[in-house]
Image: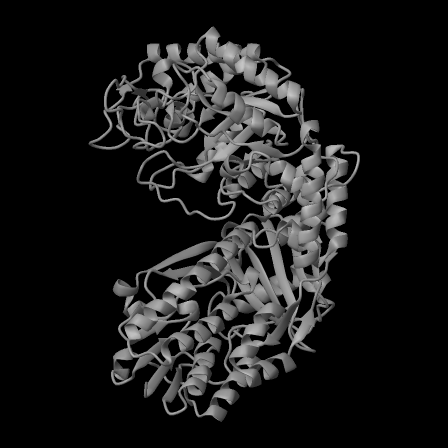
Amino acid sequence: MKRIVCLGGGPAGLYAAILFRKALPRARVEVYERNRPDDTFGWGVVFSDRTMDGFRAADEPTHAAITGGFHHWDDIDVHYRGTVTTTTGHGFCGIERKRLLQILQERGAELGVHHAFRHEVEDDAAFADADLVVAADGVNSRTRQRHEAILQPDIDTRECRYIWLGTEQPFPAFTFAFEETAHGWFQVHAYQFSKSLSTVIVETREETWRAAGLDRADAQQSIAFCENLFARYLGGHRLMSNAAHLRGSAWLNFQRVLCRRWHHGKLVLIGDAAHTAHFSIGSGTKLAMEDAIALVARTAGATDIPQALAAYQQERETEALRLQSAARNRMRWFESVARYTRMEPWQFTYSLLTGSQRIGHANLRLRDAGFVARVESELARRARAPSPRPPMFLPFECRGMTLDNRIVVSPMAQYSAQDGLPGDWHLVHLGSRATGGAGLVFTEMTCVSPTGRITPGCTGLWNEAQRDAWRRIVRFAHDNSRAKLCMQLGHSGRKGSTQLGWEQDDHPLPAGNWQTIAPSPLPYLDGISPPPREMTRADMDEVLAQFVQGTRHAAEAGFDMLELHMAHGYLLASFLSPLTNLRKDAYGGAVGNRLRFPLEVLEAVRKAWPADRPLSVRLSSADWAPGGLNEDELIEIARAMKARGADILDLSSGQTVPWQKPVYGRMWQTPFSDLVRNIVGIPTIAVGNIFEADHVNSIIASGRADLCALARPHLADAAWTLRAAAEQHWQEQWWPKQYLSAKRQLERNLERAAQMTGPV
């Protein structure tokens, strides 16, 4: 390449230019920036210690200059309700943004980069003779806008307003401060980035911002408001804005940006032009500069530029998505601060620190063992446990049931019953999970009638023979373990009369199909599934009676807990979703009407179920499809379930319609549990790609759920809980006496592995 053009003189464009000049010393590298060299619209930039290692390898002189201007800190202070909670070991450093730009400009000039400031680029077609055009022109990228149809940006304007300010007040720790006003909560993100200056970002929800009159305030009035509200943290110092000269409000909404394509021909996006990460995880500049490193590595010696750019996007998109996921979780935490303000300060702090789901219990222990020890002591006190322990091993009480730990074996369909009758397979499957150490073991969804089954292989509980077969399984678990057993009752609705799970999933049986029923006559798979019959009131009465009969059988079989399946598009769930309930009578329309029949079933089941045994409801919290269940409706449903006798809500999502588009990831459904638990005030079960002990410990300690359900991990390892106890040196975990010799060997093997590779 002979000519490379970088559009944008921020860290991304300047760093890319430096690295291109190093890799291609004969090439002409140019940077065009619309502002002056010393203009900047931020105050400080934060990097982690780990990030700086990568910068050292890319360009040692730049790394040395940046680290020479660093202000370093290890502590985080959280000011909340008149208290301050300090945690340590976080290892961050800050530098003045203006100084960072100066370092990059000087290094670029030293290498021969051509800088053109106060140069507005109206059309990148002006650089038609360039071999590569790097668009590093930020979140409001004009280059991206010009090629929007090809690059296909997805831009999500978020719910909070923020203002980016500076102050001469020193902050010895990264500081979060929360203040409640008559209009709602405001929070500060503050950190020192030089000997004399600190960044102060003030953030609040849009409706709070408007209620406080800040939508009518200019920059100076907004600064005065923030100075007054957060005066106790400023030590008499003023707040300053480098955007105070602008007309109108200086408050912004964060925009989450992600492009489907990052390149077009010889044009490529890097940094905020391609993707953004919320400032609460401080990774925007890190991502941008790491983009530059990857871009140069992929293209500097390439002969096929479009192919090299595709490889660059493939490499960086994964990291961008990973950080965006973490940033989204952390961003939503700050958007929902009011949800957590009933927490004690130690748990509020723990929730904040782990809110991105990137930092877990084990990582936090490495950073600050003393803080984690305090958290475990407080959790033990609250749970009335005799001693501190990893959070997953806390006991859990609900009505007359006490669980040894917080691990749940999820309902997992086995498709192995004959005429609804559970057999030896179910005895071994559930019995081995019970002896594997979990506190609570669920049956698969067990159907209340032959025509309520999903497949011919599904279990049932509509007759005494099935009741007695289940009693055999319950008796084995009670006699040979300390696990409690939960019967999950359900009705398949329009998703019934289908093939076994390892055949054509959700497709009708080749022969022998039965008539399905649903609130509305909508087939699950258009053109494939036969339409269900729209339920009459007589149908509802019959189904309600079936649920009550199944409940009585479950009680007689000795189950410790009962769960009603109102999720995943099955019968009761299909009443709740606006995508599957199109009724025009009293059971359709607004969510209050859609709730009627599920609540009738819940009330009748609660009356039939013993008062000393808990009752759970499994809900699909979102349909992941346009027009589906929304957050406000979920809260209304959860409150109604709690009021009608549900003791626990089991929060799953999706599987309502086949055109769903879920956003998968680690612990991806935990936010639903968090939402319902901390707004409605009811115990919850978190589900969804929870597979490590650290996941469970973090979820429980942060108050995002009371129990954690694991499915596939238990299919692969029936003794998952026993292994997790050995890994964490938790000696009080119950083991079957027949397996105690394996316990000692496992612990020795794990100890040896830890000595060879470091802490487990």
In the depicted structure, whether residue 114 falls above or below residue 298: below
Q: In terms of depth relative to the viewer, which is nearer, 149 or 523?
A: 523
Q: Quadrant of residue 476?
A: top right
* Horizontal relation, residue 36 to residue 125: left or right: right
* Horizontal relation, residue 20 to residue 164: left or right: left
Residue at 43 percent of width and 72 percent of height: 294
In the depicted structure, whether residue 352 falls above or below residue 257: above
Q: Position of residue 584 (x, y in %)?
A: 29, 23
Q: Position of residue 301 (x, y in %)?
A: 36, 81
**Can residue 170 be spotted in the picture?**
yes
Q: Quadrant of the N terminus?
A: bottom left
Residue at 36 percent of width and 89 percent of height: 27
* Horizontal relation, residue 62 to residue 308: left or right: right
The mark tally for this picture is: 0
- Find the residue positioned furthest to the left: 527
Residue at 48 percent of width and 23 percent of height: 425
* Horizontal relation, residue 326 to residue 234: left or right: left
Q: Position of residue 371 (x, y in %)?
A: 74, 52
Q: Quadrant of residue 382?
A: top right
**Can residue 342 be spotted in the picture?**
no
Residue at 64 percent of width and 71 percent of height: 93
Q: Position of residue 358 (x, y in %)?
A: 57, 54
Q: Quadrant of residue 317?
A: bottom left
Q: In terms of depth relative to the viewer, which is nearer, 267 or 334?
A: 267
- Find the residue positioned furthest to the top: 464
In the depicted structure, whether residue 318 falls above or below residue 501: below
